[in-house]
Amino acid sequence: NAGVTQTPKFRILKIGQSMTLQCTQDMNHNYMYWYRQDPGMGLKLIYYSVGAGITDKGEVPNGYNVSRSTTEDFPLRLELAAPSQTSVYFCASSETRGSGNTIYFGEGSWLTVV
Amino acid sequence: GESVGLHLPTLSVQEGDNSIINCAYSNSASDYFIWYKQESGKGPQFIIDIRSNMDKRQGQRVTVLLNKTVKHLSLQIAATQPGDSAVYFCAEKRDNYGQNFVFGPGTRLSVLP
C-alpha cells in the first residue's frame, strides 16, 4: 500500500531558488495537508485542502503556495527559498473532517536552504 | 536524514518494563486525540486514538488514558521493546479550529537493553 508519497526525500536549495515538493495519495482522501517540523517543535500546518480546487492557509503559510487540481495530488511550492525554510516537510491526508478520522503522513522531505 | 526533535525530553526505560509518556493539551474543547510514533528519518505513524467521550482505550501493548479534568493524555506501552525506541507525540483536534490538529513536540523514548 503506497499511502502518502512525497518527493524528493532530500534537497539542498540556494537562497532565492524555487522548488516544488510533490505529494500524492492513493487513499481517495478528501483532505490533504502540508506540515513542517523543526527540531524540538511540534508539526506546524502550512496549508491544507478540503478537496480538489480548494486550498486554505494554515498556521505558517508565508513563503509557500499550494494547488489542488486533483484529489490525489497536493504540491507545495517554495518561490524564493530562505534559510528559515530549512525544515522537514510532511504531506498528509485524511478522509473527512469529522472527529475520529486520523491523519496519515508521508515519509518526509528534508530541505536545507543555504 | 536529519533527526527530528533534537532537544526533546527523553524517557529511558529498560527493555521489558512498561513506559508511560505524557502529554498536556490546552483546549478543553478538543474532542479527539491521537498518539503518533516517529522513528528517525521517517514520517509519523499512527498508534492509537481516543475520543473525548472516553477516558481509556486499549490497543495491542498500548493504552491511552484521557483525563479531561486536568487536560492530560498519556500513552502506556507494555513490555517495552527495542523497536519502540522513537519519538512519541500527541495531537489534539480542536473542534473550533477547522482542519487543524495541534501537535505536541514529543518525547523521545530510549529503550535500554
Image (tube, coloured by chain):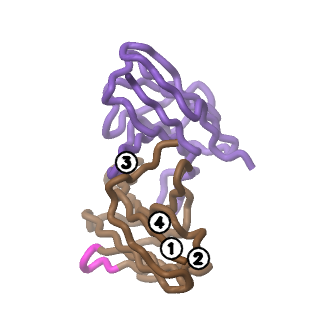
Chain colours: A purple, B brown
| Secondary structure beneath label 2 | loop
* Residue A90 at least partly seen: yes
- Mark 2 near mark 4, Cβ–Cβ under 8 Å? no
Residue beneath disc 4? B35
Provide the secondary structure element on which disc 3 rests: loop
Work out how far the residue at label 3 is from the one at label 4, CA to CA, in angstroms: 20 Å
Report x, y in % for residue A12.
Answer: 48, 24
- The residue pinned by badge 1 equals B111
Whether label 2 touches label 1, CB < 8 Å: yes
Q: CA distance from mark 2 to mark 3?
A: 37 Å
Q: CA distance from mark 3 to mark 1?
A: 37 Å
Residue B16 appears at what percent x and percent y? 56, 85
Q: Is residue A15 left or right of residue A71?
A: left
Please tell me whether residue B44 is drawn above or below residue A20 in the rendered image. below
Residues tagged by mark 3 and mark 4 found on one chain of the structure: yes
- Whole-angstrom CA distance, mark 1 to mark 4, is 18 Å
Q: Is residue B57 visible?
A: no
Magenta segment range?
Answer: B67-71
**Coordinates of residue A90 in the picture (x, y in percent):** 50, 41
Q: Earlier in the sequence, mark 2 or mark 3?
A: 2
Which residue lies under the disc numbered 2?
Answer: B81
Q: Nearer the viewer, residue B86 or A61?
A: B86
Could you tell me residue A53's position as x and y percent? 53, 27
Q: Is residue B80 above or below residue A59?
A: below
Q: Depth check: B14 or A37 in front?
A: B14
Q: Residue at x 26, y 68 (%)?
A: B28
